[in-house]
Amino acid sequence: MLSHYATVALLYPQSYKLDHRTVRYVKWMSDIGENFSAQTCQDVITEFNHVFVEVGDSRRLKQHHILNVNYQLETWNQELKIETGKIYERLFASGIENSNAVVMKVQCH
């Protein structure tokens, strides 16, 4: 599973990778490691809050958007399951020897 995630992550635009949470964590740890002071820690906390802690409406809008996208993906998933079931039924009804013809017929529609 992790290798699939890594493969997908490699396809992300470079700008997204630079803003990814883990990349920022590494940068912040490096900053603190190079200059271990109260000011550096405060700077890291301030930047973290600015980047990752959202305020009020912005957070709700993002949550709403995520729920909408999730609903759309679930809908597509259900539609794909139904279509796959129909294709399977056609293949089964036509017999294995005619399965190629059934697939070609489905692709034409």
Image (tube, helix red, strand yellow):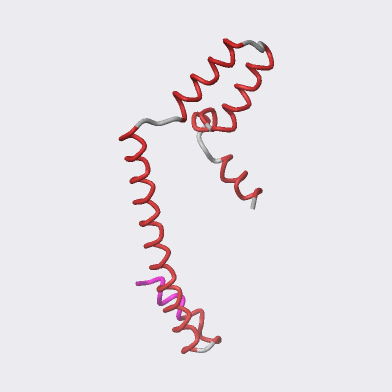
Image quarter of residue 73: bottom left
> What residue is drawn where x is 61% and y is 22%?
27
Residue 58 pos. (x, y %) = 33, 34
Q: Quadrant of the C terminus?
A: bottom left
Q: Residue at x 55, y 86 (%)?
A: 96
Query: Residue 38 falls in which quadrant of the image?
Result: top right
Is 13 rendered above or below residue 73?
above
Query: How far across and down, in percent of the image, does residue 36 sit?
Result: 66, 12
Using residue 104 as the reference point, say whether residue 58 is left or right of it.
Answer: left
Using the image as rendered, state which of residue 66 and residue 109 is in the foreground. 66
**Residue 31 position within the rendered picture, expressed as x and y whole percent measured from the top left:** 63, 16
Residue occupying the point 43% across, 64% down: 77
Residue at coordinates 40% horizontally, 31% vertically from top-left? Answer: 54
For the stretch drawn in magenta, what is the main secondary structure? helix
57 or 38, nearer to the observer: 38
Residue sitting at the far right: 33
Horizontal side, residue 45 vs residue 86: left or right: right
Q: Is residue 42 above or below residue 109?
A: above
Answer above or below: position of 16 versus 107: above
x and y percent of residue 20 in the render? Answer: 53, 32
In the image, which residues are magenta? Answer: 102-109
- Number of marks drawn: 0
Q: Nearer the viewer, residue 36 or 26?
A: 36
Q: Is residue 104 magenta?
A: yes
89 part of magenta stretch:
no
**Residue 7 in the figure: left or right of residue 92:** right
Q: Residue furthest front?
A: 38
Q: Is residue 61 above or below residue 100?
A: above
